[in-house]
Image (cartoon, rainbow, N blue to C red):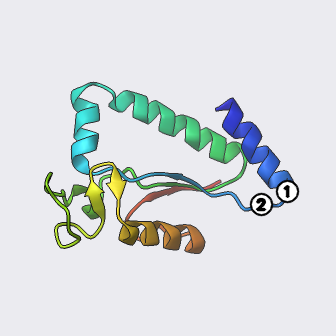
Amino acid sequence: MTELDRFITQLKQQDIAVYLLINPYQQPYLDQLTEYQLDQHLGNWKAQMIQLAKHHQLPLFDFAINSKLVTDVVAPNSKVTEDSPYFWEPAHYRPAFGDLILNSLLKNNCHHVCKLYSQ
């Protein structure tokens, strides 16, 4: 986190807008973290990100939460947007989800697809 802390400081000194976010993951990916007992590591990392956001007085948008977009699972052999307009596979999202993320960041509103931690 030290490198990220320094990088954010440099960006802010140059008056560059900084947005912090945690990417979305589909439910099967989050389930695997639980299965292999790695979910606590994700939780610890999120807690560190929350503290970093507070330190820099920045909002943190967490899209790796239990939302309808995350629990609507893509078939493993999915290749078309009709299967899921939001994910290619459990850890890679399509442009439609990217648009939702950008909208959330620019409007400072999660629209029920993320959790917002603000200073």
Question: Is residue 104 positioned above or below 91 on the image?
Answer: below
Q: Disc 1 versus disc 2: distance between alpha carbons?
A: 5 Å
Could you tell me which secondary element the residue under label 1 belongs to? loop
Q: Position of residue 77 (x, y in %)?
A: 13, 54
Task: Say left or right for 78 vs 43.
Answer: left
Question: Is residue 42 positioned above or below 118 on the image?
Answer: above
User: Which residue in the structure is indicated by mark 1?
Assistant: 14
- Of all residues, the one furthest to the top in this rendering is 37
Could you tell me which secondary element the residue under label 2 belongs to? loop
Question: Is residue 54 positioned above or below 48 on the image?
Answer: below
- Name the residue at 57% across, 41% down: 49
- Name the residue at 68% across, 57% down: 18
Task: Say left or right for 48 vs 54.
Answer: left
Q: Amino acid at mark 1?
A: Gln
Q: Dot 2: few (<14), some (14–19), or many (≥20) neighbours within 10 Å?
A: few
- Name the residue at 86% across, 52% down: 13
Residues marked 1 and 2 touching at CB (< 8 Å): yes
User: Which residue in the structure is indicated by mark 2?
Assistant: 16
Q: Amino acid at mark 2?
A: Ile
- Of all residues, the one furthest to the front in this rendering is 79
Q: Dot 1: few (<14), some (14–19), or many (≥20) neighbours within 10 Å?
A: few
Question: Is residue 6 positioned above or below 94 on the image?
Answer: above
Q: Nearer the viewer, residue 87 or 25?
A: 87
Q: Position of residue 37 (x, y in %)?
A: 28, 25
